[in-house]
Amino acid sequence: MKHLPATIGAIAARAKIEKSKSFRIDRLVAAFVPSFLPPIQTSRTLPFLELVWMPQYLMTFAMHGRRGAETAGVTVDGMTGQFTLFFAEHQVCEGAPEGESPEPAIGPDRAEAIARRAAQSWLLRYHRVRRLNIGALESIAVLRYPFWVYYYQRRRGLLDLRVMDAVTGELPGSKLKYGIVRAFQQTAAK
C-alpha cells in the first residue's frame, strides 16, 4: 500500500479552517438563526479534527506524441471518480498510514476508464494536443491521500464538517466532502 504523507499539522489545519470565510459565515448565521432541534450528543466534544486517508487510484500511462514516448501520472478518487493530474511521485511512501482508511467504492477497471477519458479531454481542452495518444497503463496502485476533517455543530442539532487537503493546505469543494461522507457511510455499513 502507498500513501502520501501529510505536510500540514493539526494546529495549522484547525486555524486555516476556522479562518475561512465560509466557516465564519456559518458561525454568524448560527448565532442569529434559531434552531429548535435538540443538541447533538456525540462521543467526542465538538468541534474536533481528525486525519482521514482517502483512497485514490494512482496510475501511470505511457503517452506517445511528436516528441516521442513519455509517461503521465494521474489519480482518480476511489469514492467519487474525480480525476486529477499527479505531480508528487517523489513524495509517495510505501506502507499503510495510521488512521481511518476506507476502501475504494469504484473498481480499478472503472477508474482506468475514467482516467483515460478525462486525460484525453484535458489534453484537448487545455493544450489542444491532437497528436498525443494515451497508450498502455504501466502501473496502477491504491494511494492513500490525507485530508483533515473538522466536525462542528453548525446550528444546534445540525452536525457539519469541513475538509482540508493535508498535503497542499487547500480547502476543496463539495465533491470531496460528498466522497468523505460516502466513505464514512460505507465504513459504518460494514
Image: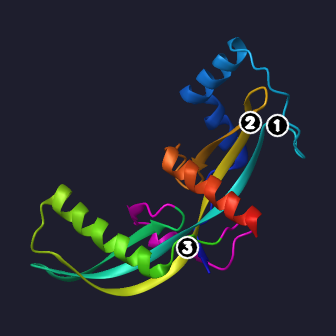
Q: Is residue 180 left or right of residue 117?
A: right
Please give the name of the residue rendered at 39% of the width and 77% of the height, measured from the top-left corner: 112
Q: Quadrant of the C terminus?
A: bottom right
Q: Quadrant of the N terminus?
A: bottom right
Q: x%, y% of residue 88?
A: 45, 67
Give, as a three-letter code, the residue at label 2.
Tyr
Answer with mark 3 or mark 2, whichever residue precedes in sequence: 3
Q: Residues within 10 Å of mark 3 (few under 14, many from 20)?
A: many
Q: Are marks 2 and 1 in contact (CB under 8 Å)?
A: yes
Answer with mark 2 or mark 1, whichever residue precedes in sequence: 1
Q: Nearer the viewer, mark 1 or mark 3?
A: 1
- Between marks 2 and 1, how big is the CA–CA gap? 5 Å
- Between marks 3 and 2, how big is the CA–CA gap? 28 Å
Q: Which residue is mark 1?
A: 46
Give, as a three-letter code, the residue at label 3.
Leu
Q: Which residue is mark 2?
A: 152
Q: Quadrant of residue 146?
A: bottom right
**In the image, residue 175 above or below residue 94:** above
Q: Quadrant of residue 145?
A: bottom right
Q: Residues within 10 Å of mark 1 (few under 14, many from 20)?
A: some
The span shown in magenta is: 80-102
Q: x%, y% of residue 18?
A: 66, 31
Give, as a three-letter code, the residue at label 1.
Leu
**Mark on residue 116?**
none
